Image (spheres, coloured by chain):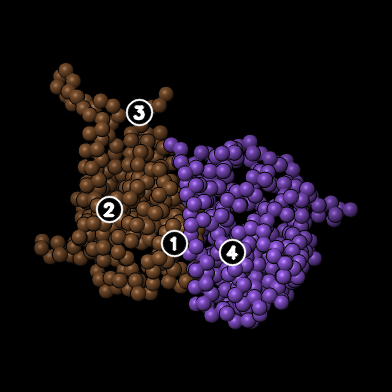
Chain colours: A brown, B purple
Amino acid sequence: MASRRVPLVLLACGSFNPITNQHMRLFELARDHMHSTGQYQVVGGIVSPVSDGYGKQGLVLAEHRIAMAKLALRSSNWVTVDEWESQQPDWTETAVTMRYHYGRILTECEQSTGTHNDSSGNTVALSSPCPQLKLLCGADFLETFKVPGLWQDDHVEEVVGHFGLVCVSRGGLEPERAVHASDTLLRHRRNIFLVREWVRNETSATEVRRALRRDLSVKYLIPDSVIEYIHQHSLYTHDSERINEDTALRPLAKQAVKSLDD
Amino acid sequence: MIVNTSFVFCLSILYQRTCSHYTAETEHHLKVRGMDDQSVTRVVLLACGSFNPVTNMHLRMFELARDHLEDTGLYRVVKGIISPVGDGYNKKGLIESSHRLAMARLSTENSDWITVDSWESLQPDWVETAKVIRHHGEMLAAEQSNDDVDTVKNAKKRRIDEYSGKSSHFTRRDGPQLMLLCGADVLESFGVPNLWKQEDIAEIVGRYGLVCVTRSGSDPHKFIHKSDMLWKYRKNIHVVHEWVTNEISATHVRQSLRRGRSVRYLLPDGVIHFIREHGLYSAESEQKNADVVLAPLHRYSDASSS
């Protein structure tokens, strides 16, 4: 008999510049882990590339990053690409992106399941409950909470406390340490799921771009279809790495303005 | 939830047939590195191992080795050969070579230069690596002398010849040089008693050559320094640094499969599909050869006691 598991959608925010096999591996590891808790049923995964307004060095156009993510995930039957965040003119806070997706998921869920009022007038879902949404991230993500000016306190509360994190670590105790070191994270530790990746696999998009600039092979690090796309559009050159070279990262600039206003 | 891998598999075949950018990419590669020079030695890379199953890491080693050798300006890598070991190797958990071969073939479908050879795996007994290299060396020499005859047997071989054929007028006389491609663990295994015959090591390293891909953390140079024989042939040992740690091991893949965990993106989709279809890698299959001595150890410890 299938026990009542909480349906769960995993959302990954990031540059995806470009998407790598390792990004997709994170989804697989996280799903296996959440299933092994016995409490969750992962029903979907969302890749949400950041908008061009993020201001990160070497960030190529969202249009390309979206196209590559779509090619890479063509063979996945549970992870999809969502363009909403990438289409926002300005950078969107992670909390806001999560709010958007959760709203969308709830609307879809309510439309498909429907509700009815029971005899006492309470609204009761007809079938399965609506999914929860959690943020899927790498271990380095927890470190970003420490960076002064990068996060608004209420956003940390919302992302970690209200939604929750599934954090894949690359061996080592850094995630545990990061949770321990932050009062906010520690308070919400039950909402932070740490997944250990036993096999060290350090393919980063930075390394992929470096190899591409140097005309070295990236085969088997990113899907063939993405390699083909990169060659077709001549992405990731020495020139493209200089995009946003002297620009402050949008979150930092935004927060700085905010603190001046205070 | 079962991933629709049959669809994926079809896609990858379709993809392979319709894409031709690799050849263009390779040509670009060669031009950038100014390798039209006739002094360039053509190289064939041979990887021996269990390939139980083949992983993206195995394929990545070929890519890293080719980049490294070509970057020296002295070599052009024209072909890679995966040679799965025969069942007589008696390694624990080693499944039938027919399956390992099939998976290796699936995994190289999208490569225009890596091939799979069944000779070693078809031998009834375990064959020493030195003999495997010798065999492939002879095959290459024979291909060389049959130059005029069209020995092309399949599309992949034709593709390989096409892009290596550019300066063949200059270099073909010498024939390509065969090198053994391995991880740092193989180099270190040279020091394990009874695993290798000393004359075999001398032949492999002295006559052919070694391309050793190493993970950050291990130091093959130190190992070469410590061994008189490896030191003597140190110029034939090419150490390739893998800066990005990538520890996908076949052992880990088998473990994940036994535990029902996802192995997606660790090995090609076509291989995952094949494993599912044939129900490979169970707790049972891992017990194969559990109490059997590894063939080389058996052979050489017998020899030394007699």
- Where disc 3 sits, the SS reads loop
Badge 2 is on which residue?
Answer: A83
Badge 3 is on which residue?
Answer: A4
Q: From the viewer's perspective, is B111 left or right of B92? A: left
Q: Which chain letter goes with mark 2?
A: A
Q: Quadrant of the N terminus of chain A?
A: top left
Q: Amino acid at mark 3?
A: Arg
- Determine the residue positioned at 40% across, 62% down: A229
- In the image shown, does B238 or A78 lie closer to the viewer? A78
Q: Amino acid at mark 4?
A: Arg
Q: Which chain letter goes with mark 3?
A: A
- Residue occupying the far right of the picture: B306
- Residue occupying the far front of the picture: B149
Badge 1 is on which residue?
Answer: A227
Q: Which chain letter goes with mark 4?
A: B
- Residue occupying the far top of the picture: A119
Q: Which chain letter goes with mark 1?
A: A
Badge 4 is on which residue?
Answer: B159
Closer to the chain start, of discs 1 and 2, is 2
- The answer to whether marks 3 and 1 mark residues whose Cβ atoms lie closer than 8 Å is no
- Where disc 4 sits, the SS reads helix
Quick check: do tags 4 and 1 share a chain? no
